[in-house]
Amino acid sequence: MAAYRIAVEALANARRHAGATTVRLRLGVHDDWLRVSVTDDGRGTTTGRDEGGVGMHSMRERAAKLGGELTVGSSPGGTSVSARLPLGAGR
């Protein structure tokens, strides 16, 4: 459920804020980890802060609660949000 919520928030951010024309959602499994990444070709974050807003904070909390991590990369050419979550967490 956390992977789904993170993906939905990242997609919503791309739609609402990025002005993107292309958004890519990727899911992958490697060893005991699930990776969820959302990349867009929009204008990048404009907050001037690494932590972002409420949505970004929520995504970070969801990943951390499961023992995972969330990374965000942003430039004027787009933003990439990637979550690495342990499989089987929360069981």
Image: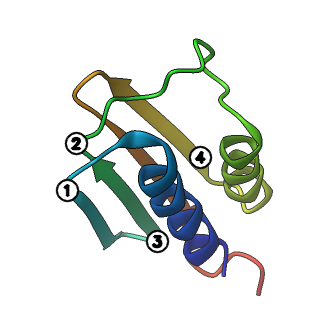
How far across and how far down the image is residue 20, in percent?
A: 28, 47
**What separation in Å lies between label 2 and label 4 (alpha carbons)?**
23 Å
Pointer 2 residue = 41
Residue in the image at 70% along x and 55% along y: 67
Identify which residue, 12 or 49, lies in the foreground. Answer: 12
**What separation in Å lies between label 4 and label 1 (alpha carbons)?**
25 Å
Q: Quadrant of residue 42?
A: top left
Residue in the image at 50% along x and 52% along y: 16
Of mark 3 and mark 1, the one earlier in the sequence is: 1
**What separation in Å lies between label 3 and label 1 (alpha carbons)?**
30 Å
**What separation in Å lies between label 4 and label 3 (alpha carbons)?**
14 Å
Identify which residue, 21 or 3, lies in the foreground. Answer: 21
Of mark 2 and mark 1, the one earlier in the sequence is: 1
**Residues at circles 4 and 1 in contact by the CB criterion of under 8 Å:** no
Pointer 1 residue = 22
Residue in the image at 37% along x and 27% along y: 74
Pointer 3 residue = 32
Pointer 4 residue = 69
Compared with 55, 42 (above or below) is above
Residue in the image at 69% along x and 75% along y: 89
Residue type, label 4: Glu
Residue at the farthest top position: 48
Identify which residue, 25 or 28, lies in the foreground. Answer: 25
Residue type, label 3: Asp
How far across and how far down the image is residue 58, in percent?
A: 75, 51
How far across and how far down the image is residue 60, in percent?
A: 69, 46
**What separation in Å lies between label 3 and label 2 (alpha carbons)?**
30 Å
Element assignment for label 4: strand
> Tag 1: Cα neighbours inside 10 Å, few (<14), some, or many (≥20)?
few
**Residues at circles 2 and 1 in contact by the CB criterion of under 8 Å:** yes
